[in-house]
Amino acid sequence: MGIRERLSDHHGSELLFADDYDSCIVGVSVGCHSGRVVYDIQKMLKVCMKNLESNEQEAWEWLEFNTFHAYVGENTPIFVDSDKDL
C-alpha cells in the first residue's frame, strides 16, 4: 500500500495530492486547516529538477506557477520550506 492509500485510509478520501511528488509528503495537517497534505518544497524542487531536466531556478519557477499558487479548494495541499538554514 502506497502513502496516498495509507493517508486516505487514516484521514479520509477528501485529501488532495500533487501528482509525482509522493516522495515529498511530510504528513497531513491538523488544527484549523486540518485534512491537507503537507509537502516539503526542498524535496519537490529536487524531483522537479530531475523530471524536467532543468536547473534549480527553472524548476522553482515551474513549481511556483503550476503548483504552489494553485488553489484547488479548501483541501489544497500545504507546501513547507524545510531548509535547515532558516
Image (tube, rainbow, N blue to C red):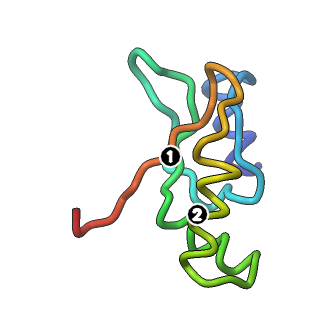
Q: Is residue 42 left or right of residue 65?
A: left
Residue 12 in which image quadrant: top right
What residue does disc 1 label?
79
Measuring 55% from the left and 78% from the top, which residue is drawn there?
56
Query: How far from the left and from the top, in percent, is residue 58?
Result: 63, 74
Query: How far from the left and from the top, in percent, is residue 53?
Result: 73, 84
Query: For numbered disc 2, what is the local secondary structure?
Result: helix
Give the spatial CA distance, label 2 vs label 1. 9 Å
Work out whether 66 lies above or below 33. Answer: below
Work out whether 75 lies above or below 45. Answer: above
Measuring 64% from the left and 36% from the top, which residue is drawn there?
7
Measuring 64% from the left and 71% from the top, which residue is drawn there?
47
Classed neighbour count for the residue bearing mark 2: other residues with Cα under 10 Å, few (<14), some (14–19), many (≥20): many
Counting the numbered discs, the total is 2
Measuring 68% from the left and 40% from the top, which residue is drawn there?
6
Query: How far from the left and from the top, in percent, is residue 36?
Result: 56, 30
Query: For numbered disc 1, what is the local secondary structure?
Result: strand
Q: Is residue 46 left or right of residue 52?
A: left
User: Furthest residue to the left?
Assistant: 86
Classed neighbour count for the residue bearing mark 1: other residues with Cα under 10 Å, few (<14), some (14–19), many (≥20): many
What residue does disc 2 label?
44
- Quadrant of the drawing holding the C terminus: bottom left
For residue 62, which numbered disc appears in the image? none
Query: How far from the left and from the top, in percent, is residue 76?
Result: 63, 31
Depth check, front residue: 33 or 4: 33
Q: Amino acid at mark 1?
A: Phe
Q: Amino acid at mark 2?
A: Met
Depth check, front residue: 79 or 23: 79
Depth check, front residue: 50 or 23: 50
Question: Tags 2 and 1 in contact by the CB under 8 Å rule?
Answer: yes
Mark before the other along the chain sequence, 2 or 1: 2
